[in-house]
């Protein structure tokens, strides 16, 4: 009996995490493999993946043995304990804030919000779209500017985007951009990084008088980094007289007490909503904002939520002006931003909904009063008028004062040898004021007594806000926790996220975001750390950063990694800047051509233009592969000026191209570098490594392959891996020397390690999966995609497939497959839109529509879906094909059938019915026992909304129908 027992060591730790992450059970996997015609995952690898790129030395990955969930959480607890989130009064755009527990639990920690995808299917995304409309309304009201977008990546990149917006929207031919010297130093640095490749001259001036000469734009700060609040109205008027446009970087909490940028004449405003309930998190993620005056709205980068109507005329929301999307505009794009910080924007807007204008004003007044009382007790305050921040002069003693404060548990800002900066916020207490006074050598003061004698030092005369803000009822109805809880539930019920359906989006990898991975990000030791705190306060974060950089380098075969880019688009930009700097360091400034295959994601071309490169498109053949003859022609033609090629591997068409090594060799022989877009890395881990088959640099989407959740369209993390020769040109940061090499290209994000707060998610994923689990995940994802392709190929042509490398005639896709609906559309009039909307009636989210090929659906099931969910999707698609056949056979009219009228709401089913199909066929196509999602609106009229652009909360009467 003892011989048959499981060893005690095997029982000790319970179920391996990989068994929870990977969906198919052994019997289900056997069924999947049988359908695709292979005997094992290893055989699938041999047949699907070119031997020329296979890396069979898996031991070289050298990752730690996989930990169980509780072991990983215990290690993260120890790492959290190594952080020291002291009382932070550093300021510089990052402030203590209180996240209401109802928001933390029901937004940040709710899979209904954090597992949602970008709302490209608006009919099943009305909840998050409404929350984003609240965000836009909040920003528009506070800034006094009528149109705000659905958030930016952070304040620094928002300011850089505003710079390029002013350049293309204005009439000035100048290439000079003036920046207020009192702007946050990281913002100035990000602007300079963005400006240089575009030939923009950044001139930093004192912010009081415009320097001589022309300029196309001006950035002013309000309040400044020093805390000083100045009246910029005259300066803005002077800039306008010169033909320049003006953007104001403004703290939204201060704007509850200060006149808005719009009221003082600004054309645009940027900033961060971090202090609206979003923890500092060592630098992010946080929702930046960008708002503009009327006339500039069609130049806005990023996402914009608009109001329109559905097929019944009911009010509905959707992403507006989607023709601006970078995968459409490509090298003509005005920005490479293809995402937002949706989850954080939802948190910030919900914070405003919860507190309302009176609550926000009270929080602002508290921070201001604390700063006023603090200043009243300190000699040498240099800041004349301020909101919540002061600079104090202590000649020759600044370091001593900062050290004394640290000894008391408070971090202050060392401005220079003679000055100390101090910021107050929502979390500042009277006890904190006493600690700061003591650090300056001032004892015995009573904050309450000083409060009664403190003069109003808010702002110069005339800058106190008198205009109303947040007047819409949504900001007044949800004061109690019960009310807010029900509001959040009502919004979530209007959406389909990963907690309700597989989201089979090709190129987006919507996989499990495990609770054990998510849990640590709300721990205060991770959440409450300032990004510019002394690095010794962040030893736990430093270990996570170092581990992730090492593990990602091993996984990809690169020599160095930067975690600073806070989105895939920013990773692309950083990688191309590294290539550009490498060529320039070698005296080859003429190398500025970037080759990009015609199938590539549009951000590739947009990023190349932003990095100062010229784009040359390389053709693809009929199988979707790079046209090698055309590539040879292009590399021969550009031997003297070729900078790089940008490819995606596996290809954007979901195929393992067997020519990738030759592509790399051709480009290297012509003097160029190879950038491999890492969006599809989920199809390679444990099987092949970018840095070993010829690539020089890649960005890695941690929000795809490494489990950081999409959050409704953000956050994302897009670090880059590079080979050794590009390592000196990785991003760095002016306020944290440990963030990158001194020879780096400058910061491309506001925070030194980008969205550091969510790095524990990917750390936990790699730690719990280990090398074997990661390889298993990759091969299971490939198996799932091939299973879907095999089950559906008789109903929808599969557009591309790679060859079978063991000689069979049947080809294999990688981790995604493209279903070609163009013949169906031509024969019946049924479109990809019809199929996508009809899937909502089946309770399923649609695949990616019309990318990379118009008129197709790209399906990526991932490794996390079990066989039942894969079959549910396949059976729904087969049933939809039978519905299409009824249209083809004239059993249903082409203009009145369940596909054309999808999705069907409960109201439409309950109302008057005069369709040639039954109510049951409309609402329950998979049977009444199946999972049912009731879309809140019918098909949305996007064109109407774009013609009549409304991008803030409509008045209540607009909801009447």
Image: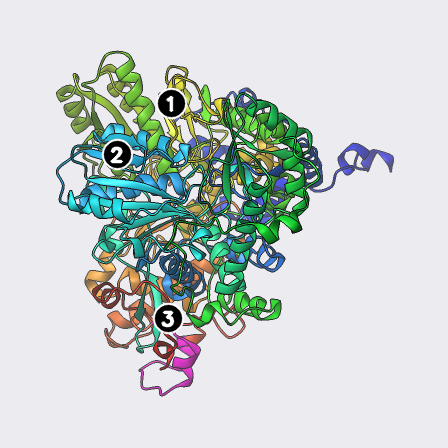
Q: Nearer the viewer, residue 434 or 844?
A: 434
Picture quarter with the C terminus? bottom left
Residue 40, given in percent of the width and then of the height, sits at 52, 37
Reading the chain from its start, which is encountered first: label 3 or label 2?
2
Tell me the mark number nearer the camera, choosing from 2 and 1. Answer: 2
How many neighbours does mark 3 have within 10 angstroms: few (below 14), some (14-19), or many (20 or more)? many
Q: Is residue 766 left or right of residue 133?
A: right
SS class of the residue under badge 1? loop
State if disc 1 and disc 2 touch (CB < 8 Å). no
910 part of magenta stretch: yes
Location of mark 3 (residue): 903
State the mark number for residue 786. Answer: none
Location of mark 2 (residue): 610
Q: Nearer the viewer, residue 897 or 580?
A: 580
| Residue found at x 83% / y 33% | 3
Magenta part of the protein: which range? 902-922
Location of mark 1 (residue): 52
Alpha carbons under labels 3 and 2: distance apart: 40 Å
């Amino acid at each position: 009996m003892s011989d048959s027992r499981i060893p005690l060591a095997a029982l000790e730790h319970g179920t391996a995490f990989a068994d929870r992450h990977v969906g198919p059970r052994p019997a289900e996997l056997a069924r999947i493999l049988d359908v695709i015609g292979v005997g094992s995952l290893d055989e699938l690898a041999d047949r699907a993946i070119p031997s020329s790129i296979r890396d069979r030395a898996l031991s070289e990955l050298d990752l730690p043995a996989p930990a169980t969930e509780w072991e990983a959480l215990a290690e993260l607890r120890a790492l959290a304990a190594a952080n020291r989130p002291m009382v932070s009064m550093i300021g510089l755009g990052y402030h203590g804030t209180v996240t209401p527990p109802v928001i933390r639990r029901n937004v940040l920690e709710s899979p209904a919000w954090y597992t949602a995808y970008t709302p490209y299917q608006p009919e099943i995304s009305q909840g998050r779209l409404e929350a984003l409309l609240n965000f836009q309304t909040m920003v528009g009201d506070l800034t006094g500017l009528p149109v705000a977008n659905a958030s930016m990546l952070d304040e620094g990149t928002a300011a850089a985007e505003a710079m390029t917006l002013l350049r293309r929207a204005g009439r000035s031919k100048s290439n000079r951009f003036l920046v207020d010297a009192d702007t946050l130093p990281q913002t100035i640095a990000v602007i300079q990084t963005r400006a240089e490749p575009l030939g923009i001259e950044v001139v930093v001036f004192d912010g009081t008088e415009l320097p001589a000469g022309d300029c196309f734009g001006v950035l002013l700060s309000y309040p400044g980094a020093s805390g000083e609040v100045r009246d910029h109205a005259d300066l803005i008027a002077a800039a306008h007289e010169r033909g320049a446009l003006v953007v104001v970087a403004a703290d939204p909490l201060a704007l509850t007490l200060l006149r808005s940028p719009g009221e003082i004449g600004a054309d645009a405003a940027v900033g961060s909503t971090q202090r609206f309930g979003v923890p500092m998190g060592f630098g992010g993620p946080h929702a930046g904002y960008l708002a503009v005056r009327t006339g500039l709205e069609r130049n806005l980068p990023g996402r914009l939520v608009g109001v329109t109507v559905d097929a019944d005329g009911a009010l509905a929301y959707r992403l507006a002006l989607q023709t601006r999307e970078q995968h459409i505009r490509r090298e003509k794009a005005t920005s490479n931003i293809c995402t937002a910080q949706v989850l954080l924007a939802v948190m910030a807007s919900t914070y405003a909904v919860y507190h309302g204008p009176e609550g926000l004003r009270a929080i602002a007044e508290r921070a201001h009063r604390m700063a006023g009382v603090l200043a009243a007790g300190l000699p040498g305050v240099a800041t004349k008028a301020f909101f919540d921040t002061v600079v104090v002069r202590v000649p020759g003693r600044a370091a001593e004062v900062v050290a004394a404060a640290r000894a008391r548990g408070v971090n202050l800002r060392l401005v220079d040898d003679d000055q100390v900066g101090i910021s107050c916020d929502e979390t500042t207490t009277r006890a904190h004021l006493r600690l700061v006074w003591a650090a300056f050598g001032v004892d015995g003061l009573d904050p309450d007594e000083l409060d009664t004698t403190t003069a109003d030092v808010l702002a110069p005369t005339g800058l106190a806000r008198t205009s109303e803000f947040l007047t819409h009822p949504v900001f007044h109805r949800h004061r109690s926790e019960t009310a807010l809880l029900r509001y959040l539930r009502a919004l979530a019920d209007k959406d389909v996220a990963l907690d309700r359906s597989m989201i089979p989006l090709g190129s987006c990898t919507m996989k499990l975001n495990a609770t054990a991975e998510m849990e640590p990000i709300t721990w205060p030791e991770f959440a409450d750390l300032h990004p510019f705190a002394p690095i010794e306060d962040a030893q736990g974060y430093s270990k996570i950063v170092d581990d992730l950089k090492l593990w990602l380098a091993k996984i990809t075969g690169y020599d160095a990694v930067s975690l600073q880019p806070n989105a895939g688009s920013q990773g692309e930009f950083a990688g191309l800047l590294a290539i550009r700097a490498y060529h320039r360091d070698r005296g080859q400034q003429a190398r500025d051509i970037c080759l990009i295959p015609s199938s590539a994601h549009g951000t590739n071309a947009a990023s190349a233009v932003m990095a100062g490169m010229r784009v040359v498109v390389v053709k693809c053949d009929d199988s979707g592969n790079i046209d090698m003859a055309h590539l040879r022609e292009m590399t021969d033609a550009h031997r003297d000026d070729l900078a790089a090629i940008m490819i995606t591997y596996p290809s954007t068409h979901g195929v393992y191209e067997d020519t990738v090594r030759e592509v790399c060799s051709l480009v290297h022989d012509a003097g160029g570098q190879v950038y491999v877009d890492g969006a599809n890395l989920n199809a390679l881990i444990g099987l092949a490594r970018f840095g070993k088959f010829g690539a020089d640099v890649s960005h890695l989407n941690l929000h795809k392959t490494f489990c950081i959740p999409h959050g409704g369209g953000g956050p994302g993390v897009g670090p880059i891996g590079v080979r050794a020769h590009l390592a000196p040109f990785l991003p760095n940061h002016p306020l944290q020397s440990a963030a990158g090499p001194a020879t780096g290209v400058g910061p491309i994000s506001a925070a030194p390690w980008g969205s550091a707060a969510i790095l524990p998610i990917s750390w936990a994923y790699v730690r719990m999966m280990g090398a074997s689990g990661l390889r298993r995940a990759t091969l299971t994802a490939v198996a799932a995609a091939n299973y879907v392709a095999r089950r559906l190929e008789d109903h929808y042509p599969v557009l591309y497939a790679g060859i079978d490398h063991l000689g069979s005639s049947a080809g294999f896709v990688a981790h995604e497959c493209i279903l070609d609906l163009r013949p169906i559309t031509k024969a019946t009039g049924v479109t990809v839109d019809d199929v996508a909307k009809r899937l909502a009636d089946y309770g399923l989210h649609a695949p990616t529509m019309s990318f990379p090929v118009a008129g197709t659906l790209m399906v990526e099931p991932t490794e996390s879906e079990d066989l039942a969910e894969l079959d549910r999707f396949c059976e729904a698609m087969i049933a939809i094909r039978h519905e299409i056949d009824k249209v083809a056979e004239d059993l249903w009219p082409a203009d009145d059938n369940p596909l054309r009228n999808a999705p069907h709401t409960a109201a439409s089913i309950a109302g008057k019915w005069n369709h040639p199909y039954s109510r049951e066929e409309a609402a329950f196509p998979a049977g009444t026992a199946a999972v049912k999602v009731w879309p809140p609106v019918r098909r949305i009229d996007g064109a109407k909304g774009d013609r009549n652009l409304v991008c803030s909360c409509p008045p209540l009467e607009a909801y009447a129908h």
